[in-house]
Image: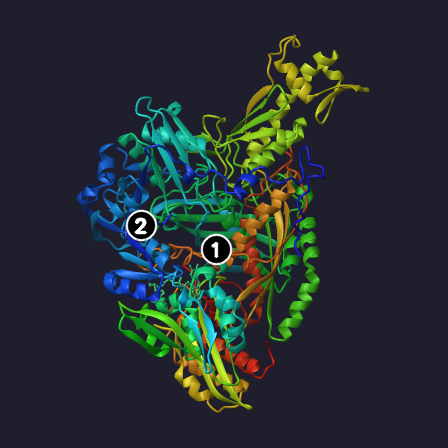
């Protein structure tokens, strides 16, 4: 049994209380959401927080709701709920694609969207999903709240824009007409982190792509959306050549490293291949040809 | 499709003897009621944690343990220097080398044991490790096995007197001159470097123990994760100088072994020393990382393989040169005369004219071991070598690999067959097993489908492996471990009411001994298996024997169980003759009772006889009361199970992801005791094989840091990577085993990796690929596809 270093534990029952505790306890304190990233790190003693603030009783953070022009997801929404949500499946099938290949049912029953984004692991799948969908993050503190784009949310590997006395409370995803999305991941084994994964989303205007986005995981310091791909896709007519061009742009705009999961060359190749596949599937779905 | 049949229902006949039978141990294990080492709690028990080296090779300059000692819950902090004062800093390995219990002079692999803390609870023990300050002085590590013998390489084992290099041993087998002569004149010679990377058994339960030394009597009770309790007891007696009758080793339920629980690890010795010094029970249980980075690894062979054949595919000879990485201490578990285990069976299932192997084993700055992982003493490596190189030959000859194998099999009339490296195969009938596997697979249809797919640019591969193992060590004349003969005792006692207790020296780690050994006794004496208790794993309650590994339980202890039962039956027959008032020769045994020949109405059951044996009244002249016997069985030879495996894979050309579509396994382990358990053993081994072929490897960086320290880094396959296994069997009994059984515990682990690799390589044939090394992760497959294959080590 791997055992963590000593720590103190508080259970918050509201966002307000959680943030107040965090402010009082300072940088040695950490929120614990699903615990599926934090606890393994504590057991390996890679993380040694002095205080844990458990936010599992903050019931106000569990929701997936639809507004006029956006979907809002509470930070404590679990993988399992993202996987099962009919609302998400309808608007953003990329969630279900991704959730099917994130970890295993035991992890998915506890792990949360907020924890996933705040962990800021460069291989994290939901970060790639949110980057693809141009999501924004609501960060709260005792003095108010601010909204940052996914682009600004991740400031480095395992580093986010969330400050010591702040909390991520909500993820907002804009709703635009005629869109669809898809996710592709290569892993060495079920439940393993991605060798590379790619998300794609398109919004159609008749036969052409009004807007398209691609987000990649495990190909650099952070999961990112690839700007140059969006430029290629904007106003273009879907075709194999277009996907190839987009795939090449994705590959050219990432900087993976060789490790046990694969060589940098292989990962670069996957960035291209998976981008192509995800785009192809998004367009097919947007055209109503695949569930 | 799966060939696993449903378990027999209560209403169906329960076999009194061999047959499908649910495992007796399962109700407690499935309900979480098993009792494992970590479940043991004792009053006043303390907890031990080990400080490990962060570096692979470094001089220990100084250790400051004062802060750790000051921790309020710490009872003791012990360093190598402390142990050295008691003469306990070093201990023997199973290969007559020595290994540091705690490092004194320098550390020789990353995560080597440097000091230990004993504290009131597990958390405090672990916390206090961070308070020990060790000053290390870096020494260049030897990580690349190929450079271990270079002139300027640092000497790892400068503790050994006069040691000036990293050499451990040279070993050879076969006839070099005869082999070379054939290679010189053969039509076709194929050579390939074939690597079996370092892997780890990774049992679900990690290693650990609870040591309890009673101060007054000096009695040591050790609950420990051991596959060989008796052998361990003797080694503790020899190392620690404790009198052997004062040592009791108990192996409770064991959560998987696979060879990982054969060696004696420093942690066990530390716990014993701690209990001895402190006078309280001490528990040591390693965590997952410690298990992966410091305990017995397996394989790590770089094999230069060569095969010589005629143009029409008659294999003439095999030659190999092996470089073996044994880590920092030579801790291989193998019989003394076999430093490379049973690698000598690398000639496989084929009738060759000559064979030769030359091997060099070296030290590197890596964890010691080389024990096993269900390898039947290095047969895994041997089978991988021959089955891979035969496929390379098929590639060069443009011959179907099934046809090539069928053409070269040892023929049934050649058994017992003496191989060119001196192994006497007891029995075999290879072609029917191969044909059955091909029929189950629909081999010709698969080849047709493959041809069609290749036309379309799709990648499909069919891989074959045909293996023969040599298991059941072993005959006393040839085999011992640290001087202990590899014969096994067994005791059987029938109680007055006809219920029985059988005591074994071997110890299950999941193989189902409590069921199969009851079935062996049941088959011989007609008492239902549920009336037979199997006692094992406790040295005070069982006869001496060398333990469970190398698939030896059924070949050795299984034979002992059958023979001890026959001994009891012989006595029962004499008692029955008294009861029925006829001569012994007039009695006939019908499972469960003796009948008077010609008058079946006159009979006594074994239960009647048991009561008589313990009851009042006279027994036949010269017969003592009671109904029990004891024997020690010395096997005459090893047993040679074999099997034909076929694997079908599909590869996504865009991502190089391999999907194992089907796996057909036909095994022949001689007489089958419990087919359901055999299938279970095969299923597990096949999953192991997929893991090794496709994802498992203990890798190191250039500084000697172990990269496989968690199950996120060291991957083990899940149900999603493994197909539904299709199993079948043939039965070719062993002629020298009393019930004709052979080992099955490791067949699938040994036989499956080459089938998977052969299938993947076959799928890549359109790219002109003849060989690729494990583990075949998507990245390694993709690099192979574009001609960039690099060895894994
Ligand atoms: C075996 C295994 C396999 C996995 N495989 C994958 C995979 O394939 N793909 C993948 O993407 N992920 C994978 N994961 C990670 C999993 O998805 C985690 O659940 C997730 O990354 C973290 O979510 P959590 O709720 O468990 O966060 P926690 O572990 O509770 O927290 C993670 C970090 O976020 C902080 N935090 C949490 N919530 C907030 C908040 N609201 N505001 C501010 N900070 C917060 C915590 O303080 C902590 O630093 C795997 C995990 C495991 C154990």
Q: Identify the residue shown where x is 63% and y is 15%.
A: B613
In which quadrant of the rendered image does the C terminus of chain B lie? bottom left
* CB-based contact (under 8 Å), mark 2 and mark 1: no
Q: Specify the quarter for ligand 1.
A: bottom left
Of the numbered discs 2 and 1, the one sitting upstream in the chain is 2
Identify whether B328 is placed above or below B390. above
The answer to whether residue B119 is seen in the rendering is: yes
Q: Check the residue under mark 1 and report the chain it is in.
A: B
Residue B353 placement, left or right of B119 = right
Q: Residue B716 carries which label?
A: 1
Where, by quadrant of the figure, is residue B407 drawn? bottom right
Q: Does the beta carbon of the residue at mark 2 sit less than 8 Å from ligand 1?
A: no
Q: Identify the residue shown where x is 40% and y is 67%.
A: A60
Identify whether B313 is placed above or below B162. below
| Residue A251 x %, y % | 42, 79
Q: Check the residue under mark 2 and report the chain it is in.
A: B
Residue B733 placement, left or right of B335 = right
Q: Nearer the viewer, mark 2 or mark 1?
A: 1
Q: Residue B109 carries which label?
A: 2
Q: Which secondary structure, mark 2? A: loop
């Amino acid at each position: 049994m791997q055992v963590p270093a000593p720590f103190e534990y508080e259970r918050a029952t509201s966002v307000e209380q959680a943030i107040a505790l965090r402010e009082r306890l300072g940088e040695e304190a950490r929120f614990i959401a699903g615990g599926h990233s934090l606890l393994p790190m504590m057991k390996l003693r890679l993380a040694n927080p002095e205080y844990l603030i458990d936010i599992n009783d903050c019931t106000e953070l569990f929701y997936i709701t639809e507004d006029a022009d956006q979907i809002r997801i509470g930070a404590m929404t679990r993988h399992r709920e993202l996987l099962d949500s009919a609302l998400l499946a309808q608007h953003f099938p990329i969630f279900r694609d991704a959730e099917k290949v994130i970890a295993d049912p035991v992890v998915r029953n506890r792990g949360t969207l907020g924890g996933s984004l705040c962990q800021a692991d460069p291989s994290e799948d939901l970060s790639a999903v949110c980057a693809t969908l141009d999501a924004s993050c609501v960060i709260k503190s005792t003095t108010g709240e601010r909204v940052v784009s996914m682009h600004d949310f991740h400031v480095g590997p395992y580093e986010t824009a969330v400050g010591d006395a702040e909390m991520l409370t909500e993820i907002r995803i804009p709703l635009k007409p005629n869109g669809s999305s898809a996710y592709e991941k290569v892993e060495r084994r079920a439940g393993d982190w991605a060798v590379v994964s790619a998300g794609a989303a398109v919004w159609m205007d008749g036969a052409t792509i009004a807007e398209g986005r691609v987000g990649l995981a495990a190909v650099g310091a952070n999961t990112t959306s690839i700007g140059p791909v969006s430029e290629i896709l904007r106003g273009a007519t879907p075709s194999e050549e277009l996907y190839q061009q987009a795939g090449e742009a994705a590959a050219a705009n990432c900087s993976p490293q060789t490790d046990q999961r694969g060589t940098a060359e292989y990962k670069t190749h996957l960035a291209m291949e998976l981008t192509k596949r995800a785009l192809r599937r998004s367009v097919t779905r947007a055209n109503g040809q695949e569930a | 499709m799966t060939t696993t049949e449903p378990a027999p229902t209560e209403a169906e006949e329960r076999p009194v003897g061999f047959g499908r039978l649910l495992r007796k141990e399962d109700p407690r294990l499935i309900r979480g009621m098993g009792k494992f080492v970590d479940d043991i709690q004792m009053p006043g028990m303390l907890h031990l944690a080990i400080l490990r080296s962060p570096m692979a090779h470094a001089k220990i300059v100084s250790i400051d343990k004062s802060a750790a000692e000051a921790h309020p819950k710490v009872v003791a902090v012990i360093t190598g220097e402390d142990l050295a004062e008691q003469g306990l800093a070093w201990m023997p390995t199973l290969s007559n080398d020595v290994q540091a219990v705690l490092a004194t002079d320098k550390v020789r692999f990353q995560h080597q044991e440097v000091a230990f803390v004993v504290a009131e609870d597990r958390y405090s023990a672990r916390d206090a490790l961070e308070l020990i300050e060790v000053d290390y002085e870096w020494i260049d590590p030897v990580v690349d096995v190929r450079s271990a013998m270079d002139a300027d390489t640092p000497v790892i084992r400068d503790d050994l007197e006069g040691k000036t290099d990293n050499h451990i041993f040279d070993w050879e087998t076969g006839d070099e001159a005869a082999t070379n002569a054939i290679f010189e004149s053969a039509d076709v010679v194929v050579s390939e470097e074939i690597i079996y990377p370092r892997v780890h058994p990774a049992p679900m339960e990690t290693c650990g123990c609870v040591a309890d030394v009673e101060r007054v009597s000096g009695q040591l009770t050790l609950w420990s994760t051991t596959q060989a309790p008796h052998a361990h007891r003797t080694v503790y007696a020899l190392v620690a100088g404790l009198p052997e009758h004062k040592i009791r080793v108990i192996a409770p339920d064991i959560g998987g072994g696979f060879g990982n629980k054969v060696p004696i690890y420093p942690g066990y010795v530390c716990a014993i020393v701690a209990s001895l010094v402190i006078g309280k029970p001490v528990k040591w249980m390693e965590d997952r990382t410690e298990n992966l980075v410091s305990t017995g690894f397996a394989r790590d062979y770089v094999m230069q393989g060569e095969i010589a054949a005629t143009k029409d595919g008659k294999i003439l000879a095999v030659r190999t040169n092996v470089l073996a990485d044994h880590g920092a201490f030579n801790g291989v578990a193998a019989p003394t005369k076999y430093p490379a285990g049973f690698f000598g069976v690398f000639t496989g299932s084929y009738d060759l004219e000559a064979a030769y192997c030359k091997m060099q084993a070296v030290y590197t700055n890596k964890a010691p071991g080389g024990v096993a992982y269900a390898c039947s003493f290095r047969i895994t490596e041997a089978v991988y070598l021959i089955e891979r190189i035969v496929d390379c030959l098929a590639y060069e000859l443009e011959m179907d690999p099934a046809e090539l194998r069928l053409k070269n099999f040892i023929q049934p009339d050649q058994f017992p067959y003496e191989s060119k490296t001196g192994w006497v195969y007891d029995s075999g009938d290879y072609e029917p097993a191969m044909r059955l596997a091909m029929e189950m697979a629909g081999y010709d249809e698969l080849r047709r489908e493959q041809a069609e797919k290749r036309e379309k640019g799709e990648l499909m591969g069919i891989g074959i492996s045909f293996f023969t193992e040599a298991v059941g060590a072993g005959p006393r004349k040839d085999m011992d471990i640290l001087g202990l003969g590899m014969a096994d005792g067994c005791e059987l006692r029938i109680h007055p009411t006809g219920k029985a207790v059988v005591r074994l020296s071997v110890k299950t780690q999941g193989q189902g001994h409590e069921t199969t050994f009851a079935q062996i006794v049941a088959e011989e004496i007609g008492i239902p298996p549920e009336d037979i208790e199997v006692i094992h794993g406790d040295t005070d309650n069982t006869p001496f024997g060398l333990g469970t590994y190398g698939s030896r339980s059924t070949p050795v202890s299984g034979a002992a169980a059958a023979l001890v039962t026959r001994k009891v039956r012989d006595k029962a027959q004499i008692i029955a003759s008294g009861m029925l008032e006829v001569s012994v020769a007039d009695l006939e045994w019908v499972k469960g009772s003796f009948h008077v020949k010609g008058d079946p109405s006159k009979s006594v059951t074994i239960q009647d006889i048991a009561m008589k044996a313990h009851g009042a009244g006279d027994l036949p002249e010269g017969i003592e009361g009671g109904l029990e016997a004891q024997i020690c069985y010395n096997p005459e030879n090893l047993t040679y199970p074999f099997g034909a495996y076929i694997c079908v894979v599909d590869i996504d050309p865009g991502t190089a992801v391999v999907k194992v579509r089907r796996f057909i396994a036909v095994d022949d382990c001689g007489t089958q005791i419990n087919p359901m358990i055999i299938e279970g053993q095969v299923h597990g081994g096949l999953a192991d094989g997929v893991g090794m072929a496709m994802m498992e490897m203990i890798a190191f960086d250039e500084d000697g840091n172990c990269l496989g320290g968690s199950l996120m880094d060291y991957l083990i396959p899940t149900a999603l990577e493994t197909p539904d296994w299709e199993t079948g069997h043939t039965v070719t009994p062993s002629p020298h085993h009393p019930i004709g059984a052979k080992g099955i515990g490791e067949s699938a682990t040994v036989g499956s990796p080459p089938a998977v690799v052969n299938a993947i390589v076959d799928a890549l044939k359109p790219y002109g690929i003849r060989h690729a090394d494990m583990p075949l992760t998507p990245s390694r497959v993709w690099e192979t596809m574009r001609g960039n294959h690099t060895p894994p080590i």
